[in-house]
Image (cartoon, coloured by chain):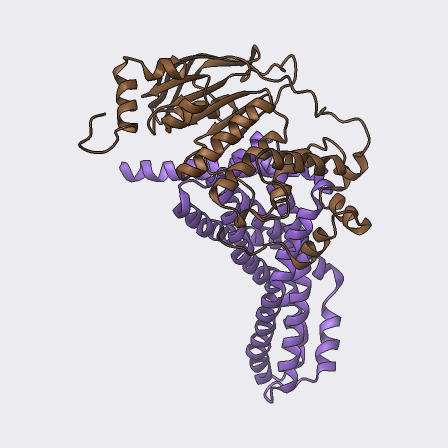
Chain colours: A brown, B purple
Amino acid sequence: MADKQDPRSPVTRFLGALGNGTQVGDLWTKLSHGFTATLMEGQDKLIRYEDSHGGLGIHIEALNKSFNGNPVLKNINLEILPGETFSLIGPSGTGKSVLLKHIVKLLMPDSGKIYIDGHDIHSQERAPRNYRYSMVFQSSALFNSLTVGENVGLWLREKRVCAEKQIRQIIREKLSLVGLDGKEEMMTSELSGGMKKRVAIARSLAMNPDLILYDEPTAELDPVTSDELAKVIIGLKEKVRLTTVIVSHDLNFALYLSDRIGMMHDGQVVEIGTPQQIKQSQNPIVRGFIYTTTKGIKGEDH
Amino acid sequence: MRSISIVGQKLLNMAQAAGEMLALLAETLYFTKEAPRNLPSITRQMSDIGIGTLPIAMLLSLFVGMVLSLQTGSELALYGTQEAIGSIVGLSMVRELGPMMTSLLVAGRIGSAMAAEVGAMKVYEEIDALRTLEINPVRYLAMPRLIACVFAVPALVIFADLVGIVGGGMIAAVNPKINVPFSVYYDNLVRSLDYMEVLKGLLKSFVFGGIIAQVGCYVGFKTTGGARGIGESTTRSVVVSFVLIMIANYFLTRFMM
């Protein structure tokens, strides 16, 4: 809870505060999200909010990526099943986040293919059916000039998905899913690290995605907040059926949440299995990672 | 041989940056068709540029007008032609000093802030977040800034011209060496200054406003390397904007002569 200063102008704050129910406030809210949003209201939309497919499969085939001649991903082959929670674990600098950024098309591979729902995502062809994915970034990547509610509703408003009244309802629902009821009007600078992560999750969920990706969700969080976040993700898994991919170096977090885990080392996936299989793996790289993350107290037998 | 290679590499980098900046300009212009959707963002930017810069722009132009009147008026007084001071101050302010001084001020104050803001968004993954939300960063960030700048800078220049001319008139009237009454100063001013002169000055500031926004956004989008990178982008945006404004000023002046 650091800086509590509201960067919005006094006029914007005043009109925003009128937003709940009054005519002036409603008009201002509509205007502040664009004239076309107001004009489009009630008409047919390009995006149907409900048409989520409830989980997509990802197939990665011989993926390679180098930066300035340094190979970061080396011949990655991976299958993530529809609706499962898959974690990629490994020490920092092994290419986990780079792989994630390829899946959301923020990076282009040097060679290899990524298929989502059977469609090559880097090809020029249109996907046979529309799917949506969203990503929760390591730094949360919230927009500081917007309130919590505006951050969560940004995609809905920009894409003119539905009427303003429904957008507000969705914002409330998604914030409630992550345990942040009634925080719509707070500025992101007023939030703690854990709350920011939860707002970022709510913002992703507002897209009603088929696939959600988390990049180091527990980075910079204390163990208690990490545990709360794990419960939020597990809770979502029960309520919303979607494919979840988590990149983390937090082994316990991954073991607790995942249906399957992939271990990455030096740009390659060296082991894939259920949490139980990973714990019992005899692969020296996996054993080494488990040992370094669960060392215990010096001098005690482990 | 090595120095030739370094110079060559620098030239190639400059050519690449120029190409990228033009591509960004084309994309930004393409998205101006969606300006009504971004009206709140455009008005907020205009308010930052216009209202935020107005006091300092007026103060600056007041003193520029005063100094211009003082320096030129005293010289003219030696030959007894100080009555021409109105047209000299008016033309100088409207043609050159108003657009140039105001644009350089906006480049320093707003262009650097744009580069820092967009740069911070790039470094802290907010631009990547926009992409994953299927929102084009050029449409969301660059287009509102370009529109705001091309309208706010000329608006500021109108005020700067006025204040500079008034400042010049005040000095002409009160300085005993010059001693030109305000009515004479004004008559001389309106005789030499026509609407085309004012429009030419505003056209210049329109272009300068575009340069400031484009450079600020381009440098911001290219930011890498954390807090240090953001600092470097801030400085770079000011330097590049100043240089491009100076170059554009020469060619615009030549073109409009």
Q: Residue furthest front?
A: A300
Q: In the shown orientation, is residue B187 left or right of residue A141?
A: right
Compare residues B250 and B48 and report the one nearer the observer: B48
* B108 over A41 or under it: above or below: below
* A107 over A76 or under it: above or below: below
Q: Residue furthest left?
A: A299
| Residue A211, image quadrant | top right
Residue A126 in the image: x percent, y percent?
Answer: 63, 15
Compare residues A93 and A191 and report the one nearer the observer: A191
Q: In the shown orientation, is residue A42 left or right of residue B125?
A: right
Q: Is residue A271 visible?
A: no
Which residue is depicted at the point 38% across and 13% down? A272
Q: Is residue B60 visible?
A: yes
Residue B158 in the image: x percent, y percent?
Answer: 69, 63
Which residue is depicted at the point 30% across and 23% down? A290
* B208 over A115 or under it: above or below: below
The C terminus of chain B is located in which quarter? bottom right
Q: In the shown orientation, is residue B73 left or right of residue A43?
A: left
* B186 over B20 or under it: above or below: below
Residue A113 in the image: x percent, y percent?
Answer: 48, 13
Residue A37 in the image: x percent, y percent?
Answer: 76, 37
The N terminus of chain B is located in which quarter? top left
